[in-house]
Image: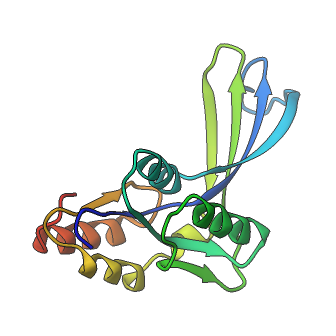
Amino acid sequence: MTGRVLVLGSLNVDLVTRVERHPRPGETVLGEGLQQVAGGKGANQAVAAAAAGAPVSMVGCVGDDAGGTAYRGRLERLGIDVAGLRTCEGVASGHAIVTVADDGENAIVVVPGANDLLDDREVAAVDALGPGDVLLVQLEVPRAVVCSAVRRAAGRGARC
């Protein structure tokens, strides 16, 4: 797997709307339009690395819902290896609700869903890494899983 990027992280379905300003506690504001886009810090990093020309593997969890199915297909179409992407039965894929105010500031609520189910099964994918490979992580998945993956990858000589 030399020279590859392995991304262990989150995949979210983002629901995005524009607002004049963010609501104060207890207040309702009206949004303008609703857009559903692929998100999640992990998947976004995998897409960026693939666009830069790196061979990329995405390791994470999605639900057995339409969002999970769509995400798997999207990554495959972008040439990203999804062999390490586990579908979790009876669980929704991760979601984020994003409001973007007219001044450009955003507010995000993440509902982890299947992202919270990453465990040692996903960390085992790190064993394929070696010197010249890169493990890319973020903290939208369980911290213990991230720490375990970084320790294992570093022990194999991969860059984290």
Looking at the picture, does residue 22 appear above or below residue 39? above
- The residue lying toward the viewer, choosing from 142 and 138, is 138
- In the visual, does 157 lie left or right of 107? left
- Residue occupying the point 18% across, 58% down: 159
- The residue lying toward the viewer, choosing from 88 and 58, is 58
Q: Measured from the top left, where is residue 42 in percent x and y?
A: 47, 56
What quarter of the picture does the N terminus occupy?
bottom left
- In the visual, does 103 lie left or right of 131? right
- In the visual, does 6 lie left or right of 93? left
- Residue occupying the point 72% across, 15% down: 102
- Is residue 93 visible from the viewing direction of this image? no
What quarter of the picture does the C terminus occupy?
bottom left
Q: How is the image coloured?
A: rainbow
- The residue lying toward the viewer, choosing from 155 and 104, is 155
Q: Measured from the top left, where is residue 124 in percent x and y?
A: 32, 83
Q: Measured from the top left, where is residue 50 in percent x and y?
A: 45, 53
- Residue occupying the point 51% across, 49% down: 44
For the image, the number of numbered tags is: 0
**Residue 55: quarter of image:** bottom left
- Is residue 68 visible from the viewing direction of this image? yes
- Residue occupying the point 36% across, 54% down: 54
Looking at the picture, does residue 150 appear above or below residue 125? above
Q: Measured from the top left, where is residue 140 in percent x and y?
A: 47, 56
- In the visual, does 138 lie left or right of 152? right
**Residue 88: quarter of image:** bottom right
Looking at the picture, does residue 139 appear above or below residue 97? below
- The residue lying toward the viewer, choosing from 6 and 20, is 6
